[in-house]
Amino acid sequence: MNKNALTVINRLTEAGFEAYLVGGCVRDMLLGREPKDFDVVTDAYPEQVKGVFRNCRLIGRRFRLAHVWFGREIIEVATFRARHSDTGEGEGTEEERRVRDNTYGTQEEDAWRRDFTVNALYFDVQHSSVIDYVGGLEDLDAGVLRLIGDPRTRYREDPVRMLRAVRFASKLGLRLGGETESLLYEMGALLEGMPPARLFEETLKLFMGGAALATFEMLRHYRLFGYLFPQTEVALSREEQGFPLMLLHHALLNTDQRLTEGKPVTPAFLFAAFLWEPMRQMAEELRAGDMSEIQSIQNAGSEVILRQTRRVSLPRRFSRISREIWQLQPRLFRRTGKQPSRLIQHPRFRAAYDFLLLRREAGEDVGALCDWWTEFQQADDERKNALMGEVSGPKKKRSRSRRKRKQPPTE
């Protein structure tokens, strides 16, 4: 049990309010998993929560929440929200949605307002019991992920729920049940109407949660991946020499491994992998028109990212790095003179090198190049000079052509 969440619950209870753990933390504890976050729900209004805690800040306009700070840790506190049956959650003006989303209700109404049954479980700390209004415990025991209410209505209210269904199912190892699953095949097009910025945030949750490869495979199975990365979906439908394109597969597997080991993962590298195949194929077409390799990568990279941002936005701070990773790939083949020493000082060298290793894992014939750069990074100056000499070959002596002196004419 998280001590800070317990402190929040105890102090709200002492102040005369109800307070419970709710959502993913309860679900994860029941599954024997370590919860990432601990959320609290209460019958206290946000302003009342702020009155109990001096270390509290109210956030949000559409969803008014209280954040209680304990150093770097935040315990999020929400108020029970009422259930609405007359108007869909995604309908109405912005002001109408804001008022509706901040209409407070009972604990049971709050449960029916949530998305999936396994996410609508409440833990009563005072009595060490789980409160379940929607059959979440039964679904958890059966290993099923099921939407609360009518799935068609819930997906229409918020199409992003389709992505959340895939994310939770792949992350938790649950199977999708009934229409929660079957409607994914026919309602995916609703994602085209979602704001690209929101889909970017959801994409990070999909692929940076530790189950990136399983999520990718499930998205493709339900034909949802193409609504997020349409260019990539087209590129992956092709094969090279009878073999499927595997770089993205290895990139996602590598992402999962890094997250398991507690290593950082940047969205820039992830998007470079997602968009590599459409960029590479477009660059090949440009080179067929006599464009240089570097120029073709620059032009193709800009165009592919521009098209991608119309569906899933990619902030410039990330897209710039993705393009640099691509543009450094041909430069890694230049290993003579001062070029290797200069390239290794480039701020994106390490990311470009890691990307080259992925290309080898995917079956590209760059094994010798990867080995060379691996040794070059570890070598001393003398060995580096030797490595560059091995690439360029022995130096040839320049032969000086001597002009013959003209002999004076003989008389």
Image: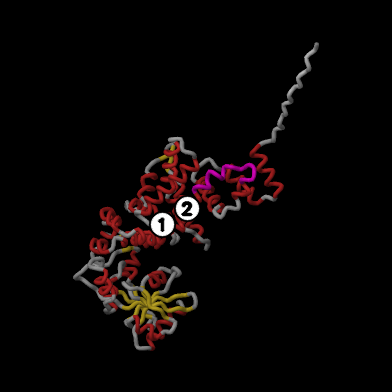
Residue under numbered circle 1: 314
Instruction: Give the mark nearer the N terminus: 1 vs 2.
Output: 1
User: What amino acid is found at the position of numbered circle 1 in the picture?
Assistant: Leu
Nearer the observer, 120 or 175: 120
The residues colored magenta run 326-339
Q: Position of residue 235 (x, y in %)?
A: 39, 44
> Label 2's element?
helix
Q: Residues within 10 Å of mark 1 (few under 14, many from 20)?
A: many
Q: Residue at x 39, y 54 (%)?
A: 216
Instruction: Say which quarter of the image contains residue 187.
Output: bottom left
Q: Residues within 10 Å of mark 2 (few under 14, many from 20)?
A: many
Q: Is residue 2 toward the left or the right of residue 227 in the image?
A: right
Q: CA distance from mark 1 to mark 2?
A: 10 Å
Which colour scheme appears in the figure?
secondary structure
Q: Which mark is residue 322?
A: 2
Quarter holding the C terminus is top right
Nearer the observer, 192 or 324: 324
Q: Is residue 169 visible?
A: no
Q: Residue at x 53, y 47 (%)?
A: 328
User: What amino acid is found at the position of numbered circle 2 in the picture?
Assistant: Ser
Q: Residue at x 33, y 75 (%)?
A: 64
Q: Residue most toward the right?
A: 411
Q: Position of residue 12 (x, y in %)?
A: 38, 85
Instruction: Say which quarter of the image contains residue 190.
Output: bottom left
Q: Position of residue 1 (x, y in %)?
A: 45, 77
Nearer the observer, 40 or 33: 40
Q: Is residue 164 visible?
A: yes
Q: Is residue 64 toward the left or the right of residue 374 in the image?
A: left
Disc 1 vs disc 2: Cβ atoms closer than 8 Å? yes
Q: Position of residue 354 (x, y in %)?
A: 54, 51
The question of residue 125 being in magenta is answered with no
> Label 1's element?
loop
